[in-house]
């Protein structure tokens, strides 16, 4: 009985998150009430407060369902996505691999695309959502730290002296990829995110002085891994 209750609670939580995704996308985060979410999920407002502290907590949980695997792919020591091991692995190859996996997930997985659209186009950082802003900043800063570590590792492994600080190089790569994603979300038919993203990343890395390398081929079904 306890196991069934736990499974039912998890099912309710997922229904609430699914409802939030669709409502946030349709009408924006600030204009969506917790009662709206409960009604769409076929649950009570009390069920929301059982699982989430407030709207910001619910929003961050919704984001984490699709972004945590992407964040992990850039973490040193993450085995599945081949993240950077500074002593034994090709750090530059792993930057390419993790970025390519993230782009493919965004381009092919509807849930990821929906959640990122909400995060970039449908949220206002008003007072009740300051925790969302803080989470966004933490994710960005963590990404920049990991890419900076990878740039330094790649510099050591190739014997290349970067033409600018690794922290600045990381900022540039983030701005390039993040900008492409945001523009693609505005009009997914405008260009092929995966192909343009890989090409732009390679040009950027060449500009830093790194040698050409084909972007790694992804295993079949790799995008579905994050769904």
Image (cartoon, rainbow, N blue to C red):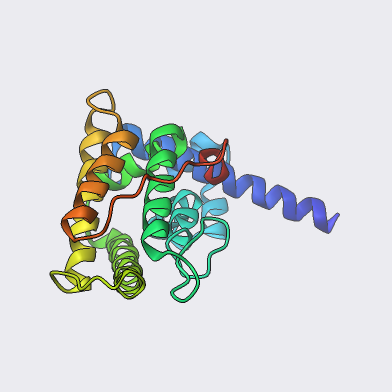
Residue 36 visible in the current orientation: no
Q: Nearest the camera: 32 or 100?
A: 100
Quarter assignment of residue 151: bottom left
Which residue is painted at 38% across and 45% down in the image?
215
Q: Nearest the camera: 136 or 22?
A: 136
**Position of 19 compared to 27: left or right?**
right
Relative image position of residue 27 (x, y in whole percent): 30, 34
Which residue is painted at 37% across and 52% down in the image?
96
Q: Quadrant of the N terminus?
A: bottom right
**Position of 155 compared to 175: left or right?**
right
Which residue is painted at 53% across and 46% down in the image?
226
Relative image position of residue 173 (x, y in whole percent): 23, 57
Q: Nearest the camera: 7 or 158?
A: 158
Total numbered badges shown on the rendered structure: 0
In the image, farthest residue toward the right: 1
Residue 26 visible in the current orientation: yes
Against 73, residue 199 (above or below) is: above
**Position of 101 compared to 124: left or right?**
right
In the image, farthest residue toward the top: 189
**Position of 43 compared to 150: left or right?**
right
Relative image position of residue 87 (x, y in whole percent): 47, 76
Relative image position of residue 167 (x, y in whole percent): 21, 72
In the image, farthest residue toward the left: 163
Q: Nearest the camera: 85 or 75?
A: 85
Q: Quadrant of the C terminus?
A: top right
Against 183, residue 136 (above or below) is: below
């Amino acid at each position: 009985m306890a196991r069934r209750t736990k499974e039912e609670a998890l099912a309710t939580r997922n229904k609430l998150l699914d409802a939030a995704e669709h409502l946030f996308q349709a009408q924006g985060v600030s204009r969506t009430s917790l009662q709206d979410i409960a009604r769409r999920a076929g649950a009570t407002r009390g069920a929301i407060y059982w699982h989430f502290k407030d709207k910001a907590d619910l929003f961050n949980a919704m984001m984490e369902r699709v972004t945590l695997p992407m964040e992990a792919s850039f973490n040193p020591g993450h085995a599945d996505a081949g993240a950077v091991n500074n002593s034994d692995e090709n750090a530059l190859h792993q930057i390419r691999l993790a970025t390519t996996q993230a782009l493919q997930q965004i381009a092919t997985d509807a849930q990821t695309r929906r959640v990122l659209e909400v995060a970039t186009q449908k949220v206002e950082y008003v007072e009740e959502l300051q925790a969302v802003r803080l989470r966004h900043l933490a994710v960005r800063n963590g990404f920049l730290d990991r890419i900076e570590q990878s740039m330094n590792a790649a510099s050591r492994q190739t014997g290349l002296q970067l033409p600018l600080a690794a922290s600045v190089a990381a900022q540039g790569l983030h701005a390039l990829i993040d900008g492409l994603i945001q523009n693609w979300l505005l009009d997914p038919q405008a260009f092929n995110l995966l192909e343009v993203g890989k090409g732009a990343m390679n040009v950027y890395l060449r500009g830093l002085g790194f040698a050409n390398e084909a972007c790694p081929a992804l295993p079949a079904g790799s995008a579905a891994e994050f769904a």
